[in-house]
Image: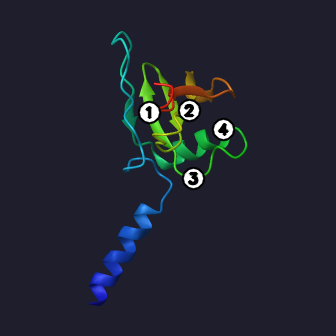
Amino acid sequence: MRATTILLLLVLAGCASNTGLSGYCSVFPLRGGKAVPIGLIRLDPEMERTLRSQLPRGQGSGHICWYTFGDQLIAAGPRRPDLGNSGYVFSRRGDVWVLSSSAPLILALPKVIE
């Protein structure tokens, strides 16, 4: 019984983490099929901390889903089917990743607009 309780607590702790590979993250379909697909990825914890620190104030906490798009990384919030979704783009500059713009990129429109 004690082992079951400990296992349950570990699972719940994992679900409460703010790393993105969970049911909270969407894979966004591409319209028109001419772009490189957006791939959901898991980042090294140190790299993720570095990237989160570059996000605009209030955007670096909570669940973040990480994607690759060509030679860029995208940080997005969890899926919100009725509200749409947006994310922030990072570009590689030498050996480091840098936030490309403080303005978010629209990844999905709200259902009412689609």
Residue furthest right in the image: 57
Which is more N-terminal, label 1 or label 3?
A: 3
Q: What is the number of the mark on residue 87?
A: 2
In the picture of the structure, the residue carrying the numbered disc 4 is: 55
The location of residue 85, given as percent across then percent down, is 52, 34
In the picture of the structure, the residue carrying the numbered disc 3 is: 62
Residue 55 in the figure: left or right of residue 21: right
Q: Distance between the Cα atoms at labels 3 and 2?
A: 14 Å
The location of residue 57, given as percent across then percent down, is 73, 43
Residue 12 in the figure: left or right of residue 88: left
Which is more N-terminal, label 4 or label 2?
A: 4
Q: Kindly identify the amino acid type of the residue bearing the numbered disc 1.
A: Tyr
Q: Kindly identify the amino acid type of the residue bearing the numbered disc 2.
A: Gly
In the picture of the structure, the residue carrying the numbered disc 1 is: 67
Q: Nearer the viewer, mark 3 or mark 4?
A: 3
Which is more N-terminal, label 4 or label 1?
A: 4
Q: Nearer the viewer, residue 54 or 34?
A: 34
Q: Write down the quadrant of residue 34 in the picture.
A: top left
Q: Kindly identify the amino acid type of the residue bearing the numbered disc 3.
A: Gly
